[in-house]
Image (cartoon, helix red, strand yellow):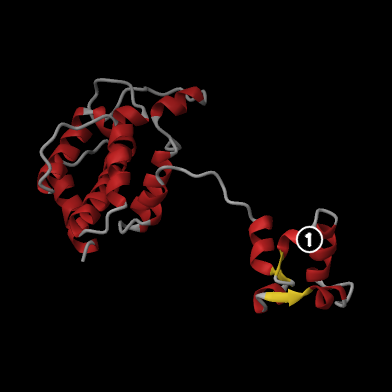
Amino acid sequence: MKEFQRRESLNIEEVEKMECGSGLLQCYLLLKANGVDQFVQAGKFRIQKMYKFLHPVGAQVGWKRLICNSHASPKSTFIMWLAVQNRLATKDKLIRWQLSIDGTCGLCQLESESLEHLFFSCSYSQEIWKQVLLSLGVTRAVLPWHEEVQIAVKKSRNKQKQACKYSIAFIESVYCVWLQRNSKVFRDHVDPVKTVVSNIMFNVECRCQ
């Protein structure tokens, strides 16, 4: 298969003359029955075409740019990646997994903990995001989770500095809220909103240079 990496195109005759143990020949014979002509252009076997055939494009997701274009810290981006797929182990999920726990949100002590509640219906996390928005010069109400994600996705497509800062701030805010949630669960401690917002904006300024 190293020959795939070294050469961009091969004559069909060259492929057929290769040794039987050649990985390229094996692939060629495997695909021949399905019409190898689809990989031939101007009389040459195009490896790029076959590569795309063997590695089809996966399903497109709307949040792709938010994650792939992220300038936030890797840890924050990873948590964001889990969050947009609803894969964080929030208490509502743990209860569905038959764990005997109190499902109340530890940050506000008012409602059941779920992804949508944690980001940003919870009074504690809502205040964090509200203060971060004000620090960015954005004066609007905090919206439901999926709407906030859509706004952040749109910002991530923009290369202007202010849009970059917004995307980083959103990702870092999600990460910091998750850290505070875990701190409450495992250490029974939560930092003041002002401290969390200060940390978020510090990270934003550091990473948006």
Q: Is residue 76 above or below residue 143?
A: below
Q: Residue at x 34, y 56 (%)?
A: 70
- Judge by depth and name the residue closer to the eye, 102 or 169: 169
Q: Position of residue 43 (x, y in %)?
A: 74, 72
Instruction: Tell me if 183 is positioned left or right of 130 in this view.
Output: right
Relative depth, front residue between 5 and 171 = 5
Q: Which residue shows up at 42% across the image and 48% down it?
A: 64
Residue name at image x 22 percent, y 50 percent: 166
Q: Position of residue 60 (x, y in %)?
A: 50, 44
Whether residue 187 is visible here, answered yes or no, is: no
Residue occupying the far front of the picture: 42
Quadrant assignment, res 159: bottom left
* Label 1 neighbour load within 10 Å: few <14, some 14-19, many 20+: some
Q: Which residue is mark 1?
A: 36
Q: Residue 148 appears in which quarter of the rendering?
A: top left
Amino acid type, mark 1: Val
Against 146, is 158 above or below?
below
The answer, for residue 59, to whether it is visible in the render is: yes
Q: Quadrant of the N terminus?
A: bottom right
